[in-house]
Amino acid sequence: MPRTTSLQEILIDQLKDLYSAETQITKALPKMAKAATSADLKQGFQLHLAQTKEHAERIKTICEALKVKPTGKKCMATAGLVEEGQESIDEDASP
């Protein structure tokens, strides 16, 4: 991995990581809401989805101002959380 040489590079790297996290969560939350049996939990997932979409748009706007694309990096931490969420959905458990 190349060495980071400036604060701007660190900022861009972190923005790409955050954008990846937000877009992964945006894809996962509808599945989680669909699988939820509690109305309150379903509503919580839907609220979180709306907030997450807003976060992703803000990051996109910042990246546009910096003239960089927010893509190109995958947030592995979020990927792990999404995978765990899918495992929970896939379990054959009672509500």
Image: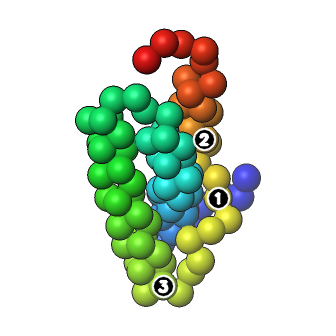
Q: Mark 3 points at which residue?
A: 64
Residue 78 seen in the figure: no
Q: Give residue 21's mark.
A: none
Image-based side of 43 in relation to 59, left or right? left
| Tag in front: 2 or 3 | 2
What is the x, y in percent for residue 73? 64, 58
Q: Which amino acid does label 2 sit on?
A: Ala
What is the x, y in percent for residue 66? 47, 83
Q: Name the residue under label 2.
A: 79
Crowding near the residue tagged with mark 1, few <14, some 14–19, many ≥20 C-alpha atoms within 10 Å:
some
What is the x, y in percent for residue 74? 64, 53
Q: What element carries label 2?
A: helix
The numbered mark, 2 or 1, whose residue comes first in the sequence reads: 1
Q: Name the residue under label 1.
A: 73
Q: What residue type is labelled 1?
A: Lys
The numbered mark, 3 or 1, whose residue comes first in the sequence reads: 3
Q: Which of 23 and 18 is in front in this view?
A: 23
What is the x, y in percent for residue 4? 59, 61
Is 85 rendered above or below residue 53?
above
Crowding near the residue tagged with mark 3, few <14, some 14–19, many ≥20 C-alpha atoms within 10 Å:
few
